Amino acid sequence: MRRAFWHSRDFQRYFFTYAILFFCMLLAGAVVVVLATQAERQQAADQQRTAQGKRIAEVVDNAWDSAIEAGNFLRSSTWVQKYMSETDVFAQEFGPLRQREFSQSLTALCASTDLIRGISIWYPQKDIVVSSAGWFSSEEYEAYAARKFQTPDGFLADYVLQREKAFGPLLSNEFAFSNTGYLVYIQQMDILAAPRALTMVFIDKAALQKLLGRVCGEQVAGFVLTGTEDRTYLVYGRAADEAGFYKEVFPSQNMMLNYTLFFRPAVTPLTENLGGAVILIALSLAGVFLAYGLASFQYSPLNRLIRKASERARQKAPLDGGIDTIEACVDKLYDDNETLEHTLASYRHALRDQTNAQLLKGYFTEDVSEELHLHDIPFTYQYWYIVLVFRQQQEDGLSAPEDAQRQIRLLVTLKQALQHTQCGQMHCELVENIEGHVAVIAEFSRAPGDEAAVDLGETLYDALAGQELECSVFAARPRKGLMGISVAYQEAKETMQEQPAKFGVTLARPSAQYYYPLDWESQLIRAMREGNAKLAQAILRQLYEENAALHLSHTLIQRVATLLYETMRRIIFEAKLPAETFLEIEEPQYAGSLTQVFRMAERAALCICEQTLRKKEAASVGINQSLVEYVDENVFDPELSLNMLSDIFGVSNASISRLFKNATGDTFYNYITDRRMRRAQELLRLRGYSPKGMAAEVGYDNEYSFKRAFVRQYGITPKEYAERESQHEANISSPG
């Protein structure tokens, strides 16, 4: 099974989808872990660099402290203070031996630290410089300093006295002079504006670099010593802004100096990288196995569905199998659903149009409001209605497609015009086809005048004329209620028949002096033929109300009575009702008033409906008996069907189905299927399973239809039933 799974393209898609998903999750997790680890390492490295930088700055500051302490020691020395005196009181104390002793004390002071290579005290007012090498005049000392410390000419005057901001009250802010070998630190021995003594300390750069080499570890790549105005005094190591190096600046705590340190990036240990790689590989393998398991779990039910769909699909069309089969089935379902939706939309539109057409012809049933609500038509009995009928002028020489196209243009133009037309109406319904014409029903909340009907008709007529569509518009006078819609339409229809060549907009004013429209008469005849007395009486009552509103004369009342009596007689003749029916009805033309005429007509309609129902009941009893007998005689005929019975008995399929169920209590197909399956059981028990002839013997065209019906009835195939019965008989006949 697993191997079969792997060879499926659908399973491979699932597997690789899960694998890629897990890989992405693993990659995202690895990235998060790496970033978090790098952040922690970076933070630790930053803390380490800061601590190391502070330690280096402290060591270097200690070096400056040695120079400062040397100056402080000399400033507190008695002989230095005595020699600064402007009098000659202490002159005898500075003889040659004492001068040599003082020079030796400076030499000893230099030897106390590895950084200081020379200490000199300059007395500018006495033009004397005391150094470890002896006592010099200023000029001699400059020559000596030039040889020993490579100082430039005018060193004392230019770099010591004249250096701007070189002096504080007691200590120097930074170095007075710097060259490749030495840094010169100056300290004033007094607090006068014109100093009487200055200590010059020569710091060896080579010794300072050795000190940095001892305190700077492998992580420190370089060190730069800078002062104010970005003066560079010392450069140690690779002191440059190279890629990957970290740069940090630490200020001196003793002088106005900055220490710029360049750190190498931290190197991750190889074992740590290998450990992370091993964990990543292990998680990747686990993700692969998990992806395989999830893909198998998801594909198992889909595989069963694919097999079933493939088996069904191969019966109709060869497919490659797999999920393509399901896609084909789903596509077909969607196509069928879309076709069904279009069909339903067309059906709903046709029903809506049919309902509106029935309103125009007359809707006499009590469920008219429910029917209108079902089709979203907001017409009620309380509102007023105007009906417009549009008759398009016929044009000679137009083909059928051209005429259809012109009709479509008319409908589209009217729909667009109704959307933008406002003549006080609340709602409008467009009836696309009513006896070959187009009609518009406009609803008003209050009673409009005749001019409203004319205005609406002229507005729509102008819209059609703008599209070069010539037609006649007949506008009926406003009527109230749902029956008023039919009355208005009948008026417009009669006016249209009386004025066939009329153009433009015409207000309907029929010439008939009584009300007996052909559409209402047709519905009255149909109601009595069906035996629907309730509907017939509703039509007659509405005819009475419309004629009563006209205040007919006696002659016109007799005319209406004659028309009603002729209608009744025609129904009796056409329906072949018993002759005594003529005796039971009264002739309404002998009535004196309109009320008496319609009362007699209602009694006649009730009588005709009762006779019609009796005749139908008697006919149905005979048909039922003959129908069941015929089915029993031909139940094993493969040609037996509702269509066949409909042709034989002369009624519709629906009527045959209804009559058969009334007679037997079961549907036609259930009845014949049960009879055929019982016969099939008998044959299978007697003869066993013989697929070729048995289907025809029990009333089926082919073996497939027979098998399907048998399985649906009993849940097993005919062959399985025959084998089971044979085994059962064998068990009974065996002695043990």
Image (tube, rainbow, N blue to C red):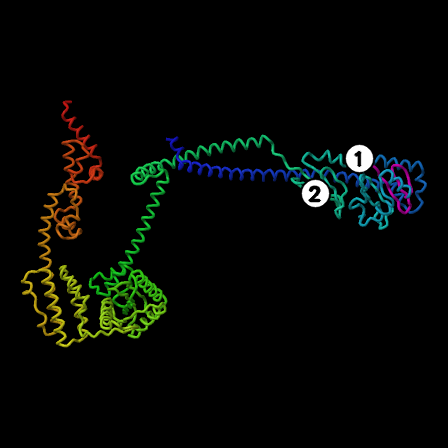
Residue 60 magenta-drawn? Answer: no
Q: Say which element carries label 1.
A: loop
Image quadrant holding the N terminus, namely: top left
Boundaries of the magenta span: 114-138
**Could you say where residue 410 lies in the image, as x and y percent from the top left?**
32, 65
Image quadrant holding the C terminus, namely: top left
Residue 124 magenta-drawn? Answer: yes
Say which of 665 and 389 sits in front: 389
Give me the residue at 81% from left, 50% from top.
Answer: 164
The amino acid on which the numbered mark 1 sits, given as a three-letter code, is Thr
Q: Residues within 10 Å of mark 1 (few under 14, many from 20)?
A: some
- On the rendered structure, is 42 left or right of 203? left
Say which of 128 and 443 sits in front: 443
Q: Which mark is residue 129?
A: none
Residue reaching furthest to the front = 397
Rendering quarter of residue 5: top left
Q: Are marks 2 and 1 in contact (CB under 8 Å)?
A: no
User: Eyeballing the image, is 687 above or below 53?
Assistant: above
**Could you say where residue 499 lies in the image, as x and y percent from the top left?**
24, 73
Residue 176 visible to an observer of this rendering: yes
According to the image, label 1 marks what residue? 113
Rendering quarter of residue 311: top left
Tell which tag, 2 or 1, sits nearer the viewer.
2
- On the rendered structure, is 604 left or right of 456? left
- On the rendered structure, is 241 left or right of 332? right
Give me the residue at 32% from left, 63% from top.
Answer: 406
Label located before the other in sequence (2 or 1): 1
The amino acid on which the numbered mark 2 sits, given as a three-letter code, is Phe
Q: Which mark is residue 250?
A: 2
